[in-house]
Image (cartoon, rainbow, N blue to C red):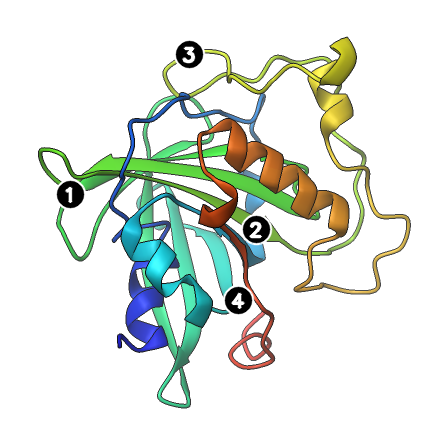
């Protein structure tokens, strides 16, 4: 069986090793008026979704990791993920290059040397972020993955209401309409009334929101996992 660190080498870098089993039913989404500077900082990778057979086989041995987003020296973002390997903390950094509208990035898979697209589908910049990744390894080897980032920093005012988010290619996301005709932002989780420091645990409404997001992209219940928290490799470098 593959060791947990080998699994995270793919998953923590936004699905590098995923292999798609079914065609993508929806286009990538994009946070409206994305503000990159607010997205910087520490996040916890707390949820993943994929339909790949590899992910379904290995998801039970995965746990949370810490991901830090920082500006890259030559533009774009450095996504640095820290996880446990052989009782020691190991770090991997991925360069996300701007690829279209704000919130759209591309990266090169360190394993397959192929290019993949990442979009920040939705975020309140303070407690959660929904990311969507897709790419191609070769003929018949596409992959898709949804990622939930969670954290709990100092509260900020919520983003403006009534905006229609669009994907990296300009198409409206399939799940933007609220229930019973509500505007899409009414479906967003409300800000936590009290948040004592940063937290690894996403709130129940955030988890429900991620599940809805993942299912709208064609991921099944079986392919959605919320990762168990761990105290290792989380706090030594905020």
Q: Nearer the viewer, residue 75 or 69?
A: 69
Mark 3 residue element: loop
Q: Nearer the viewer, residue 227 or 83?
A: 227
- Residue lying at the far bottom in this picture: please name it: 87
Quadrant containing the N terminus in the rendered view: bottom left
For label 3, the residue is 170
Q: Of discs 1 and 4, which sits in the foreground?
A: 4
Q: Bin the neighbour count of mark 4 within 10 Å (Cα to Cα): few under 14, some 14-19, many 20 and up.
A: many
Badge 4 or badge 2: first in the primary sequence: 4
Q: Badges 1 and 4: C-beta atoms under 8 Å apart? A: no
Residue 64: assigned label: 4
For label 2, the residue is 149
Mark 1 residue element: loop
Say which quarter of the image contains residue 142: top left
Across and down, in percent, residue 53 comes to: 29, 51
Query: Would residue 107 appear left or right of 209 to someone viewing this image?
Result: left
Residue at (25% x, 36% y) in the render: 135
For label 1, the residue is 114
Q: Report the Cα–Cα distance between label 1 and label 4.
A: 26 Å
Q: Report the Cα–Cα distance between label 1 and label 3.
A: 23 Å
Q: Bin the neighbour count of mark 3 within 10 Å (Cα to Cα): few under 14, some 14-19, many 20 and up.
A: some
Mark 2 residue element: strand
Q: Badges 4 and 3: C-beta atoms under 8 Å apart? A: no
């Amino acid at each position: 069986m593959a060791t947990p660190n080998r699994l995270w080498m793919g998953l923590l870098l936004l699905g590098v090793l995923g292999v798609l089993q079914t065609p993508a039913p929806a286009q990538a989404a994009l946070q409206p008026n994305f503000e990159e500077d607010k997205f910087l900082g520490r996040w916890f990778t707390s949820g993943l979704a994929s339909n790949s057979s590899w992910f379904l086989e290995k998801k039970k041995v995965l746990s949370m990791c810490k991901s830090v987003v920082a500006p890259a020296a030559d533009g774009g973002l450095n996504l640095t993920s820290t996880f446990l390997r052989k009782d020691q903390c190991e770090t991997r950094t991925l360069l996300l290059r701007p690829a279209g509208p704000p919130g759209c990035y591309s990266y090169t898979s360190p394993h397959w040397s192929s290019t993949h697209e990442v979009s920040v589908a939705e975020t309140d910049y303070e407690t959660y972020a929904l990311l969507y990744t897709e790419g191609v390894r070769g003929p018949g080897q596409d992959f898709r993955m949804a990622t939930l980032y969670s954290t709990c920093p100092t509260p900020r005012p919520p983003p403006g209401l009534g905006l229609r988010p669009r994907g990296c290619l300009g198409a409206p996301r399939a799940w933007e309409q609220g229930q019973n005709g509500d505007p899409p932002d009414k479906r967003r989780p409300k800000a936590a009334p009290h948040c004592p420091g940063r937290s690894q645990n996403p709130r129940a409404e955030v988890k429900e929101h991620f599940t809805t997001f993942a299912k709208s992209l064609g991921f099944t219940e079986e392919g959605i996992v919320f990762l168990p928290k761990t105290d290792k490799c989380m706090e030594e470098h905020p």
